[in-house]
Image (cartoon, helix red, strand yellow):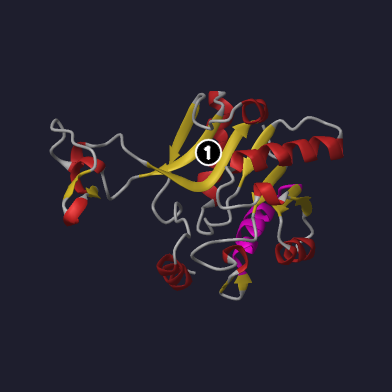
Amino acid sequence: MKIKDIFIFARGGSKEIKNKNIIKIKGKPLISYSINFAKNLKIKNIFISTDSKKIKSIAKKKRTFLIDRPKNLATDKSPEIYSWKHAINWYENKFKKKLEIFVSLPTTSPLRKKKDFLSALKLFNSSRCDMLVAIYKPNHFPSFNIVKRMKKNNIKIYESNKSVTNRQIVNNVFNIATCFYIANRNYVMKTDNLFSGNIKGIEVDEESAFDLDTKFQLKILKKLI
């Protein structure tokens, strides 16, 4: 099934990196990379859900549809699934038709690759799953090198698993990447737990999976782009 609509969610607030979604990377606001990615896919309708006046101004210049995101859905404690539901309701009220496939492109993954998205869409269409996400190989595993700090600076392995003794044999452990989310509309609307259904994962490389969260990662991103 061909995708005609893509949603981008970008709230104004951010903790570690102030105004993260509009911070300039090589002269362009971060959100522009996701908008341009959608345009390169020849997507007919691009929707920006935001509470920020500055982001709305950028979205208007990019000729996208604006969804006014309620303040209660734009805090750092607001589960994004409720913003997804809000956006779907907005879409269906405006266009008087039911959305079929929901696609979200997080702003924090500007290095995502077109080939990965197209492969993911193909898998989603063929598998009839509830949702598909990108995954990538981690360089940390709880049974080896993730610890909890206890009292008096004592530490202990976060997950003790005596049967696992070699990192190389842990072949089925992955991190979730924020490249894209592709989901069945009905599933998004009925669930409060995104991973409670039939969820598929498609593997991408670490570059495509890059997720901007810290100031140090921002330095790396600026070098890469």
Res. 41 visible in picture: no
- Up the image or down, 112 lies above or below 127; here it is below
Report the magenta residues as a range: 29-44
Q: Is residue 126 above or below residue 104?
A: above
Q: Residue at x 60, y 67 (%)?
A: 19
Element type at mark 1: helix
State left or right for residue 36 relative to residue 164.
right
The residue that disc 1 covers is: 120
Q: Position of residue 182 (x, y in %)?
A: 59, 37
65 relative to 166, above or below: below
Query: What percent of the width, then of the height, locates residue 130?
Result: 56, 27
Magenta residues, dominant SS class: helix
Picture residue at 57% right of the left edge, 23% below the top: 128
Q: Is residue 28 visible?
A: yes
Spot the residue most to the front: 151
Counting from the top left corner in percent of width and height, residue 106 is at: 57, 51
Query: Residue 3's image quarter?
Result: top right
Is 67 displayed left or right of 106 in the figure? right
186 part of magenta stretch = no
Residue at left offset 45%, top offset 35%? 201
Mark 1 surroundings: few (<14), some (14-19) or many (≥20) residues within 10 A: many
In this view, the residue in front, 7 or 127, is: 7
Q: How many numbered circles are shown? A: 1
Question: Viewer-proximal residue, 55 or 121?
Answer: 55
Image quadrant holding the N terminus, namely: top right
Q: Position of residue 190 (x, y in %)?
A: 64, 25
The amino acid at mark 1 is Ala
Q: In the figure, residue 33 lies in which quadrant? A: bottom right
**Residue 211 as seen in the image, left or right of residue 56:** left
